[in-house]
Image (spheres, grey):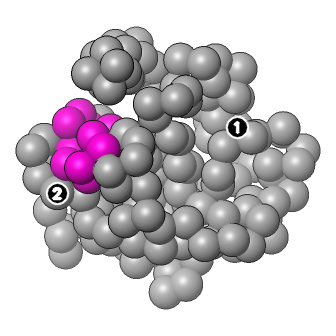
Amino acid sequence: MSDARPVPAVGDPAPDFTLRDHHGGPVSLAGLRGRTNVALVFFPFAFSGICTGELREIRDGLEDFQHDGIQVLAISCDPMYSLRAWADAEGYFFPLLADFWPHGDVARRYGVLDEQVGAPGRATFLLDAEGLVVWRAVGPMGQRRDFGPYRAALAELRSRAS
């Protein structure tokens, strides 16, 4: 991971950003503030085995990950066109955001960009509706996320939103 910026801690404000989704539309974290909680899911590479499995798990259990109180935003440094092809092939219905240019800027601001590889590690940040980090998990690229604690944190966030 990058040592340029520290990973936001629980209680910290999440760094704001605006990125293009896989359809080319802008998605702004500030635009979601006050409206919904957010799950930021950083992943290294579209079309890779572990990333495909993880996003399939989110897709197939979308009711656990995204609902009226939580919006999933998946972020990688892949170009928008690659993310669109991947979303179409896999049937992902949540936004895939391209942190392509300036390359890795958002991942860098979250302290999760591996500068040598040019991609983020596996990191998840749950943000409350005010944009504060309420849970986080950061792991290495080659290791699949453990979705158990992620689901528990989402359930807790969901109960607070009710």
**Residue ID for mark 2:** 13
Measured along the vertical axis of the image, is residue 118 above or below residue 130?
below
Region rendered in magenta: 124-136
**Residue at 20% across / 36% down in the picture?**
134
In the image, 109: left or right of 7?
right
Q: Quadrant of residue 92?
A: top right
- Is residue 143 left or right of 10 when viewed as pictured? right
Q: Amino acid at mark 2?
A: Pro
Q: Which residue position holds label 1? A: 52
Point out the frontmost of discs 2 and 1. Answer: 2
Judging from the image, what secondary structure is the residue with disc 1 in?
helix
Closer to the chain start, of discs 2 and 1, is: 2
Q: Secondary structure at mark 2?
A: loop
Q: Main secondary structure of the magenta part?
A: strand
Q: In the rendered image, is residue 20 in sight? A: yes
Q: Residue furthest right?
A: 89
The type of residue carrying mark 1 is Thr
Q: Quadrant of the N terminus?
A: bottom left
Give the residue furthest to the bottom.
102
Q: Are marks 2 and 1 in contact (CB under 8 Å)?
A: no
Q: Residue at x 64, y 54 (%)?
A: 96
- Please name whichever residue, 98 or 50, is drawn nearer the observer in this view of the structure: 98
Which is more toward the observer, 99 or 68?
A: 68
**Residue 44 counted in the magenta span:** no
Q: Residue at x 88, y 48 (%)?
A: 88
Residue 133 drawn at (x, y percent): 21, 45
Please state if 157 lies on the left or on the right of 3 as rendered. right
